[in-house]
Image (cartoon, helix red, strand yellow):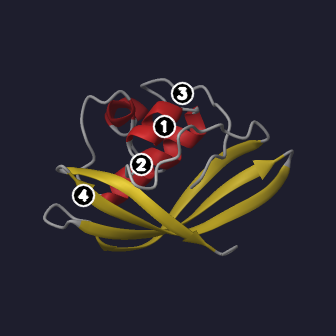
Amino acid sequence: MGGRGTTRKTTDTSACPCGAGREYGECCGPLHRAETSAATAEALMRSRFSAFVVGDVDHLLRSWHPQTRPAGLTLDPRLRWTRLEVLATERGGLFDTTGTVEFRAHYRDRGRPGTLHERSRFHREDGEWVYLDGLTDDE
């Protein structure tokens, strides 16, 4: 997921935007605050989706592989990310060094619904999962 999204107010007791069924303060919030790291590639991908929802550019850049990370990131204020569907995962577990997560991220752009379908690749760098890159239906 590139530089897309707007900010939505989220508190620690709000439902986490990633859709994992937990409160933000127990799910993606600690990852966003760099209090902990993602145990799996899917957990990192979910935290990145949530970062787009809440507008956490710092987490997005921090969780991007150094070889593919942009110098900066500006989120598109017209997009409001609304829902995440994880379709498939390959590897990306506790003992893996690479992983792939396929997902659909639903959004609204000036009131019109849309969907981003991506197959994201993740790599474990210095013991931490990072987003390497992704292929979308547009590519």
Q: State whether residue 106 is above or below residue 76.
A: below
Amino acid at pointer 3: Thr
Query: Label 1, label 2: how many angstroms apart (C-alpha)?
Result: 25 Å
Give whichever of 135, 89 is nearer the camera. Answer: 135
| Residue 98 appears left or right of 62 | left
Residue at mark 3: 10
In 3D space, how far apart are the residues under numbered discs 3 and 4 (Cα atoms)? Answer: 28 Å
Local packing at callout 4 (Cα closer than 10 Å; few below 14, some 14-19, many 20+) is some
Answer whether residue 75 is visible to the viewer in this image.
Answer: yes
Mark 2 or mark 4: whose residue is earlier in sequence: 2
User: Dot 4 corresponds to which residue?
Assistant: 124
Say few, some or many: other residues with alpha carbon within 10 Å of mark 2 (under 14 / 14 to 19 / 20 or more). some
Q: Look at the numbered discs 1 and 2 and tell me whether their residues touch, using CB distance below 8 Å.
A: no
Q: Amino acid at mark 1?
A: Ala
Rendered location of residue 131, percent (x, y): 40, 55
Which residue bears the numbered disc 1?
Answer: 15
In percent of the image, x 55 and y 71: which residue is there? 135
In primary-sequence order, the first of circles 3 and 1 is 3
Camera sees residue 17: no
Which one is in front, 40 or 26?
40
User: In the visual, does 82 lie left or right of 15?
Assistant: right
The residue positioned 35% from the left and 62% from the top of the image is 122
Q: CA distance from mark 4 to mark 1?
A: 28 Å
